[in-house]
């Protein structure tokens, strides 16, 4: 098999496995909560940012559908294994390493759980491998696309805070650990991340104070 095709094949297999297996048990209580919150959009809720509730509610616009709801974690699991394969290639791994990493991703208990039902950790199936991929590429040194990558990283950190409040701060610490000499573009990316991540957190605090 062509090595460049392995990430796509892995993503398709993981998506198919989750899509086929996920709808065979009922709604998890947190999923029902996400759906209700999503149908009452806010910048932030008392106990969670808005992205997961909005995605959950979006799948139910045509009526109750466990299949569509569980397709959300299947998509993020597929994106996560695809990105993991790209990360493997950045470390010089060949076809065997990509296949092994894909199998580990699919059968690791906690990752399988995140891909089976909707939770605030579901989006992290993709965003954490994506962060790791970005950090590795940055650590290899500057190139013509370096500023765009750093800015993309800042937006990524901020958006990920819309799934779980702690995500952005954790990711910013990890990005600093790569030893990259941040320039003005990097400083701007951090500003973007902190600004975006502050919105759901501030909104949640405001709502708690009102109650």
Image: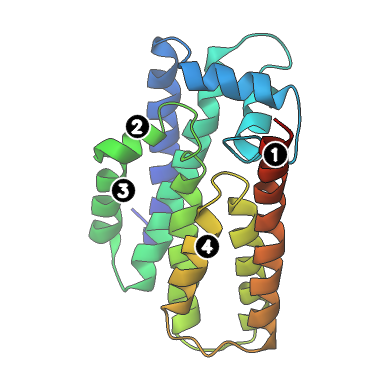
Q: Pointers 3 and 2 in contact (CB under 8 A)?
A: no
Q: Rounded to the nearest whole Å, what is the CA distance between mark 4 and mark 1? A: 23 Å
- Between circles 3 and 2, the one closer to the viewer is 2
Q: Rounded to the nearest whole Å, what is the CA distance between mark 4 and mark 3? A: 28 Å
Residue 169 numbered tag: 4
Residue 53 numbered tag: none
Residue ID at (40%, 48%): 81
In terms of sequence position, does the residue under pointer 1 or pointer 3 come before the other?
3
Residue 209 numbered tag: 1
Instruction: Please tell me whether mark 2 sits on a helix, a strand or a loop.
Output: helix
- Between circles 1 and 3, the one closer to the viewer is 1
Residue tagged by mark 3? 102
Other residues around mark 4 within 10 Å, as few (<14) / some (14–19) / many (≥20): some
- Between circles 1 and 2, the one closer to the viewer is 1
Specify the quadrant that holds the C terminus: top right
- Between circles 4 and 1, the one closer to the viewer is 1
Question: How many numbered discs sit on the rendered protein?
Answer: 4
Q: Pointers 1 and 3 in contact (CB under 8 A)?
A: no
- Between circles 2 and 4, the one closer to the viewer is 4
Residue tagged by mark 2? 113
Q: x%, y% of residue 13? A: 39, 36
């Amino acid at each position: 098999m062509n090595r460049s095709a392995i990430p796509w094949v892995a993503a398709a297999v993981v998506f198919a496995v989750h899509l086929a297996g996920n709808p065979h048990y009922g709604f998890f209580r947190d999923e029902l909560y996400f759906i209700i919150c999503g149908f009452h959009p806010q910048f932030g809720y008392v106990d969670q940012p808005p992205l997961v509730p909005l995605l959950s509610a979006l799948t139910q616009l045509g009526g109750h559908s466990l299949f569509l709801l569980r397709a959300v974690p299947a998509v993020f699991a597929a994106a996560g294994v695809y990105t993991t394969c790209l990360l493997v290639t950045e470390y010089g791994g060949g076809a065997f390493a990509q296949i092994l990493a894909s199998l580990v991703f699919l059968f690791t208990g906690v990752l399988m759980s995140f891909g089976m039902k909707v939770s605030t950790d579901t989006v992290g199936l993709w965003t954490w491998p994506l962060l790791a991929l970005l950090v590795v590429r940055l650590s290899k040194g500057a190139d013509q696309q370096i500023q765009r990558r750093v800015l993309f990283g800042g937006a990524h950190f901020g958006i990920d805070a819309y799934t779980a409040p702690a995500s952005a701060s954790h990711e910013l610490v990890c990005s600093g650990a790569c030893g990259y000499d941040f320039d003005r573009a990097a400083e701007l990316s951090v500003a973007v991340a902190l600004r975006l991540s502050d919105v759901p957190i501030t909104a949640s605090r405001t709502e708690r104070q009102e109650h």
